[in-house]
Amino acid sequence: MKNSRKNFVKGHKKEITIFFSTLVLILVLSLISFSQNLEEKVDEYVNPYIFMEKFSGSILIAQKGEIILNKSYGMANYEHSILNTPHTKFRLGSLSKQFTALAIMQLQEKGLLNVKDFISRYFPDYPEAAKMITVHHLLTHTSGIPNFTQFSDYQKTWMISSSPEETIARFKDKPLESTPGEKYNYSNSGYILLGAIIEKVSGQSYEMYLRENIFQPLKMMNTGYDHNSTILKDRAAGYILSDEGLANADYIDMSIPYGAGALYATVEDLYLWDRALYTEKLVKKSSLDKIFTPFKGNYGYGWRIEDSFNRKVVAHSGGINGFTTHIARYLVDEVCIIVLINIEGAPVDKIGRDLAAIVFGEKYESPQVHLSIEIDPKIYDSYIGEYELSPNFNTVITREDNHLFAQVTGQPKFEIYPESETKYFLKVVDAQITFIRNEQSKVTELIMHQGGKEYPAKKIK
């Protein structure tokens, strides 16, 4: 009887082992099939952008701790025909802010600072406003400090090396744009101050602190502070799309973006970062909860916190000369989407959202390839004028010989190209313009199409 029972159990153990082995095999094959199907859909989606020279870079998509897509497109260097790969290093721009914010939270846990501290504690020579501004205000873009990268002379200064103190001097005496804590107003200036605070309280350079306390513990060996003089293996060159096609982006001295945008990384390193944020490797859960708590403008500490496809997502995008970047973390689903592009002004927010739609089986609009046609230039004359998008924010349409141009308030003038008599598109950004005529065939307004949204503008002149 005992032997019979043993044989019965032994036989069932074997069946159970075969069952689970088969189940694992089915799951593996399903994952492979899903990944292959995902790659086909992503390729189909991205190819029109590549054709229009609006995409060149790397994409990594992961789900539940498994990488389901890790693919690169285009060139890291077009002059030398060097392909982008998953090991290519891209400048991150404002994705750097999330690392600056986490460093601040580490220092708070060490008792070296408190986000409730007024910044006068760290900058005693800062104007009177420093007695009202807290570290929390800097982290959440609610300090009211004007954004120095929006100053009219910014482009004249970005080629010149600047210490944190020199950069701070550019904006510290400017009047606040709002009362601290009153409203959200994105400001790179605040994250310059945060970088300087990290140095003051840690006794290390911003670069060294991040390396020793974030990058090395996570084995992010392909992430760091970018320096113009460093020979950096696998560094991508940065480009901008002009009316004539891709061109080398303007030089920027990397001392300027500092704690607001000076880092570089690969998609694979950013995935290590994503996984670490589900743990307490770097900071306690209470600190992570604070980081991912939305304040005004749905902004936390270095992250935007929103809902997309009825899912909570923490995300951020970045832009710096020659580069556009994006990371989105759908927390409940543990889906991470990382997009690093070495073309300035690429439609990275739309790309990131559409890639998420592909993963979740949601609706999305594939990019349209816009081709210019020949039309009678006399038609352009009826479009010339000024159109109001919002108070004090207009689009001006002008004609020069047989070319039509659009210029939005505070931005350069760009040529627009006809794809029909009423529909036009820009090459330098993913935007289109439709001119509207009334029953008398008089042009009364235009509609700007950008980022999946429409912006009507009445003709006022």
Image (spheres, grey):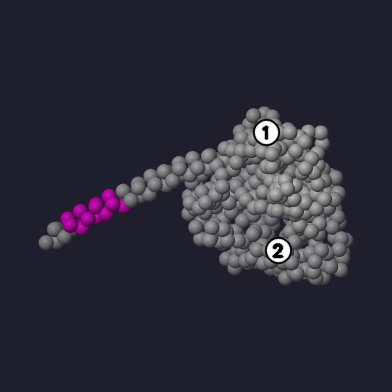
Dot label at residue 66: none
Quadrant holding the N terminus: bottom left
Check disc 2 and report its element: helix, strand or loop.
loop
Check disc 1 and report its element: helix, strand or loop.
loop
The amino acid beneath tag 1 is Ile
Coordinates of residue 324 in the picture (x, y in percent)? 67, 46
Distance, label 1 to label 2, CA atoms, is: 46 Å
Task: Please name whichever residue, 370 or 223, is drawn nearer the observer in this view of the structure.
Answer: 370
Query: Looking at the image, is 456 positioned above or below residue 48?
Result: below
Question: Which quadrant holds residue 50?
Answer: top right
Look at 84% across and 46% down and name the residue there: 157
Look at 64% across and 52% down and name the residue there: 453
Residue range corresponding to the magenta coloring:
7-20
Coordinates of residue 70 in the picture (x, y in percent)? 53, 43
Coordinates of residue 116 in the picture (x, y in percent)? 72, 70
Look at 49% across and 40% down and name the residue there: 40
Side of 388 where 97 appears, left or right: left
Using the rendered image of the protein, determine whether residue 325 is visible from the camera's viewpoint.
no
On the image, numbered disc 1 is attached to which residue? 373
Query: Looking at the image, is 231 positioned above or below residue 149?
Result: above
On the image, numbered disc 2 is attached to which residue? 140
Foreground mark, 1 or 2?
A: 1
Question: Which quadrant holds residue 300?
Answer: bottom right
